[in-house]
Image: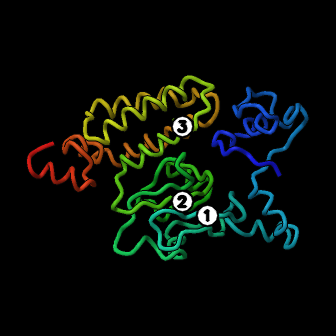
């Protein structure tokens, strides 16, 4: 066991290997891939912990029993992590292809008195879903066809009290902080996304800011050194796609409509 320093970027396998070697955790240029030249230039296989944790069940019950779970192309089971506005947050083991509706039944549903607003199927680095996606099969193909990614299966649940603009800002602040800084699109793009989102959150934005955000995202997509950049833009692009009206409401009101002080000021005719 080797304790890491908690860097998000070290979830990228080559950055993890650099970190293990005592170097700064940054992604390597590939090829060569780790299976050819990995840790200390030796052939290396990097597995997720969950993959290794599946092995005892397969050895105990057989490959056929494991493959009988899940869907035709996404076989087996996985750990689904439910957090946020859910009655009983936790880790839920279920076959791939389970739906959020079924997982909410297991976890007691969205907290009492509130309705589901939006959620992440695979963590904040995957495009968000809304209540329209409750019955999307949570397997690799089903989530992909619906416009997102299964990712880490970290299902963050947000109810109708949540401001999607502020949530997106908080996520983007995290990605700005965790960017390793190796490539310009990610390093500079996350910085400017935070600046624009903060202005929008405070009610000082414009329609042009939304177009600017999408333009920044377009200049990050596919141009970053690793998948971090594509993940960082996912919540921004998807939140504008599903909740553009809420962004507009911020600069119409001169503040967040979920902030009682801003709502009062607007009702009194001020900003």
Mark 3 is surrounded, within 10 Å at the Cα level, by few (under 14), some (14 to 19) or many (20 or more) other residues, namely some
List x then y, in percent, for residue 249: 23, 46
Mark 1 is surrounded, within 10 Å at the Cα level, by few (under 14), some (14 to 19) or many (20 or more) other residues, namely many
List x then y, in percent, for residue 120: 50, 54
Mark 1 residue element: strand
Q: In terms of sequence position, does the residue under pointer 1 or pointer 3 come before the other?
A: 1
**Would residue 234 appear left or right of 196 to someone viewing this image?**
right
Looking at the image, which residue sits at the far right?
42
Mark 2 residue element: strand
Residue at numbered disc 2: 155
Residue at numbered disc 1: 80
Residue at numbered disc 3: 177
Q: In terms of sequence position, does the residue under pointer 2 or pointer 3 come before the other?
A: 2
Looking at the image, which residue sits at the far top?
184
User: Relative to residue 125, is residue 185 depicted above or below?
Assistant: above
Q: What is the number of the mark on residue 102? A: none
Image marks 1 and 2: residues in contact by CB distance under 8 Å: yes
Residue at x-position 34% and y-position 48%: 243
> For the residues marked 1 and 2, what is the alpha-carbon distance in whole angstroms?
7 Å
In terms of image quadrants, where is residue 214?
top left
Residue at x-position 55% and y-position 36%: 230
Residue at x-position 54% and y-position 45%: 125
């Amino acid at each position: 066991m080797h304790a890491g320093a908690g860097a998000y970027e070290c979830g990228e396998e080559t950055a993890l290997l650099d970190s293990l070697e005592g170097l700064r955790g940054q992604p390597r240029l590939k090829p060569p891939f780790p299976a050819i030249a990995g840790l200390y230039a030796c052939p290396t296989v990097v597995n997720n912990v969950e993959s290794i944790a599946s092995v005892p069940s397969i050895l105990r019950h057989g490959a056929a029993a494991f493959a009988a779970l899940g869907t035709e192309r996404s076989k087996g089971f996985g750990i689904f992590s439910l957090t946020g506005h859910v009655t009983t947050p936790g880790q839920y083991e279920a076959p791939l292809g389970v739906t959020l509706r079924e997982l909410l039944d297991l976890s007691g549903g969205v907290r009492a008195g509130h309705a589901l607003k939006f959620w992440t199927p695979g963590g904040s680095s995957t495009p968000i879903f809304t209540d329209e996606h409750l019955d999307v099969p949570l397997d690799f193909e089903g989530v992909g066809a619906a416009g997102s990614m299964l990712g880490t299966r970290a299902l963050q649940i947000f109810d109708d009290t949540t401001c999607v603009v502020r949530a997106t800002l908080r996520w983007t602040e995290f990605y700005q902080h965790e960017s390793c800084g190796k490539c310009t699109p990610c390093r500079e793009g996350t910085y400017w996304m935070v600046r624009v989102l903060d202005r929008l959150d405070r009610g000082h934005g414009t329609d042009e800011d939304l177009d600017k955000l999408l333009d920044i995202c377009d200049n990050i997509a596919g141009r970053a050194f690793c998948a971090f950049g594509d993940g960082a833009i996912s919540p921004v692009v998807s939140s504008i796609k599903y909740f553009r009206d809420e962004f507009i409401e911020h600069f119409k009101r001169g503040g967040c409509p979920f902030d009682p002080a801003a709502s009062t000021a607007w009702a009194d005719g001020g900003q």
